[in-house]
Image (cartoon, rainbow, N blue to C red):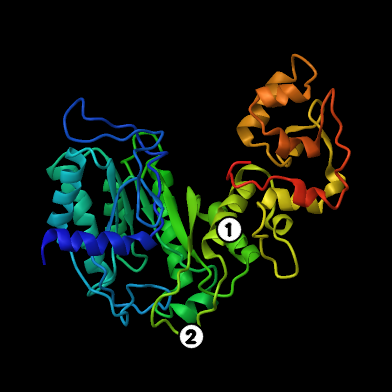
Amino acid sequence: MELLDKLAILADAAKYDASCASSATDRRDSLKGGIGSTEGSGICHAYAPDGRCISLLKILLTNACMYDCLYCINRRSSNVQRARFTAQEVVELTLGFYRRNCIEGLFLSSGIIRTPDYTMEQVVEVARSLREDHGFRGYIHLKTIPDADPALMALAGRYADRLSINVELPSQEGLDAFAPEKDLPGIRRSMARLRLRIEEGREKGAPRFAPAGQSTQMIVGADASTDRQILGASTNLYSSYGLKRVYYSAFSPIPHASSALPPRAAPLLREHRLYQADWLLRFYGFAEEEITTGDDDNLALDMDPKLAWALAHRAAFPVDVNTAPRETLLRVPGMGVKSVGRLLVARRHRRLRLDDLARLRLSLPKVSPFVVTADHRPRFVDSPRLATALPRQLSLFA
């Protein structure tokens, strides 16, 4: 098979792996030799045909796999065209795209072939060759295999900026039903070992080990897990394994998949709401039981989670922007972490008016129904019509 044909197959197959930016890694450049660079603030972005933002050359080493996970397009029983790169072909593609200024790094995953150790050896060899044979100083993210030998995982962390292990689903029950060959306790043990090595690598004088940390991916909608269960599992992953990010991936129905897979409405919108809720949990002081609504413990799809919480807790509003503490302001719809920081600085010098909020780049239609300023007090915070009158926020940060 021609190299470009392989690229077409294996780049398309990789779109089901959630990507990431290159933030949090070491700053490196090629001023003292080598090729490539990485910036702490992120790298250039490209867009896949399905609209997902991709920062890296994102490919699979192979889409052949010995596992038969029902939610995966590349599962053993799936009728898809198979292809496989050699390690050297991935190295050549990465360097070629970099020299053409198309990418700034590599995101490499793979199906499992022969054994987990054999597959992991091939993945590590790509990173080793880029670093040692070609002096590549750009960003590398490797998807690792939890069943692989810990020594191979240690080598992967030596060459990669970030490592990730997919937990796939929030519970062992979900894995038993849809991916019986995978073991959640084993996945978590591998993540724990990575955390220890990452923490050791941050000590002064210690060998470099995955300086951008580790992340994971959770599939949304493949099993019957509620949003509260998903967010609870994510919270546990952040606290237990020091993850930089949990990536949510909307399940897309796969041709010939088992009828046992539940149908899901608006999977991409649900994925988006989970990202918004994840942000509220990590940076806004919310708990998962606060931001899931209704008897089914799921997020509202017709509005963002913060707005849904505010409408369900109208007694907490309006909030006086001149006296309220930071943690209260963070719960106001339309206010993000940065805008609250600017507001706290501004109110040290004067009592804030409504036009001051506009100068702080806050959206008055979103904010004004929930706040009190020196010249404004909302009249309709208790009105049942408020929910339909408000603009619906799509931003992840408000």
Residue 68 x, y percent position in the rendering: 36, 79
Residue closest to the eye, 72 or 304? 304
Residue appearing at x 34%, y 32% in the figure: 27
Q: Secondary structure at mark 2?
A: loop
Between the C-alphas of marks 2 and 1, the distance is: 31 Å
| Image quadrant containing the C terminus | top right
Q: Which mark is residue 122?
A: none
Residue closest to the eye, 202 or 70? 70
- Where 181 falls versus 197 (above or below)? below
Q: Residues within 10 Å of mark 1 (few under 14, many from 20)?
A: few
N-terminal of the pair, mark 2 or mark 1, is 1
Residue appearing at x 54%, y 57% in the figure: 237
Residue bearing mark 2: 259
Q: Amino acid at mark 1?
A: Asn
Q: Is residue 3 left or right of residue 80?
A: left
Q: Residues within 10 Å of mark 2 (few under 14, many from 20)?
A: few
Q: Is residue 268 left or right of residue 359?
A: left
Q: Amino acid at mark 2?
A: Ser
Residue 378 x, y percent position in the rendering: 85, 36
Q: Secondary structure at mark 1?
A: helix
Residue bearing mark 1: 236
Residue closest to the eye, 279 or 80? 80
| Image quadrant containing the N terminus | bottom left
The answer to whether residue 61 is visible is no
Q: Residue furthest bottom?
A: 259
Q: Is residue 158 left or right of residue 388?
A: left
Residue appearing at x 39%, y 37% in the figure: 42
The answer to whether residue 89 is visible is yes
